[in-house]
Image: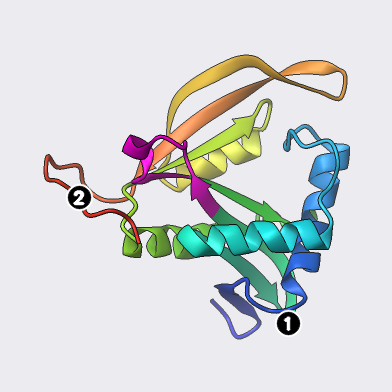
Amino acid sequence: MTEDRVVRDADRPGDAGACAAIYAPYVTDTAISFETVAPSAEEMAQRIERARRTHAWLVLEEAGAVVGYAYAGPFRERAAYRWSCEVSVYLKQDHGRRGGGRLLYDALLERLVERGYRTAAAGMTLPNAASERFHEAMGFEPVGTYRGVGWKHGRWRDVAWAQKALVPSDEGDPAPPS
């Protein structure tokens, strides 16, 4: 990171509003998010708090302004999945291809390992070649595609899934994530 680029916990009063503003165009103008109504700053604050309790929510600041965020949450609710998580990253739409996504994911994945998570999964609405290339570059491997699982902007959408082992697999009895 440089002096004007900082990845940190989303724990400041303006972070929820900044994240909501970054996310809104993905909701309203693209099929990247399957949400149809952009969450308010208040709803985003609740999401941040939930993620921070068990996983993580990080923001990227450039010159003091939040320009991106990454977070993790439960992969599925069943107990056997508790060592796996789902991850996402969003950047202001004019901030792609500058390394911000990598900075966020590097810090996020490190935090997840520290908390005891073993596998990260990411879903990507198709088509989304940029996200597919990004996740591949971050070491995620494609594991399958759900066909026609979401309806947005007048058509059925596929979702590709990729996963990354955060720690080497073994047969030991792991401690629960913290």
Q: Is residue 17 left or right of residue 150?
A: right
Asked if residue 81 is positioned above or below residue 159 in the image, the reply reads below
Give the residue at x 73% y 71%.
15
Asked if residue 141 is positioned above or below residue 145 in the image, the reply reads below
Looking at the image, is mark 2 or mark 1 earlier in the sequence?
1
Q: Quadrant of residue 131?
A: top right
Q: Is residue 77 left or right of residue 68?
A: left
* Neighbour tally class for label 1: few under 14, some 14-19, many 20 plus, Cα within 10 Å: few
Q: Work out whether residue 75 or residue 68 is closer to the camera in this orientation and state it.
A: 75
Image quadrant containing the C terminus: bottom left
Give the residue at x 52% y 49%.
73
Q: Quadrant of residue 59?
A: bottom right
Q: Work out whether residue 131 or residue 170 is closer to the camera in this orientation and state it.
A: 170
Residue bounds of the magenta highlight: 72-85
SS class, disc 1: loop
Q: Amino acid at mark 2?
A: Pro
Q: Position of residue 136 (x, y in %)?
A: 47, 39
Q: Is residue 158 magenta?
A: no
Give the residue at x 66% y 26%.
126
Residue topped by disc 1: 64
Q: Are marks 2 and 1 in contact (CB under 8 Å)?
A: no
Q: Amino acid at mark 1?
A: Gly
Q: Position of residue 88 (x, y in %)?
A: 58, 48
Rendered image: mark on residue 174: 2
Give the residue at x 62% y 71%.
10
Q: Nearer the viewer, mark 2 or mark 1?
A: 2
Q: Quadrant of residue 146?
A: top right
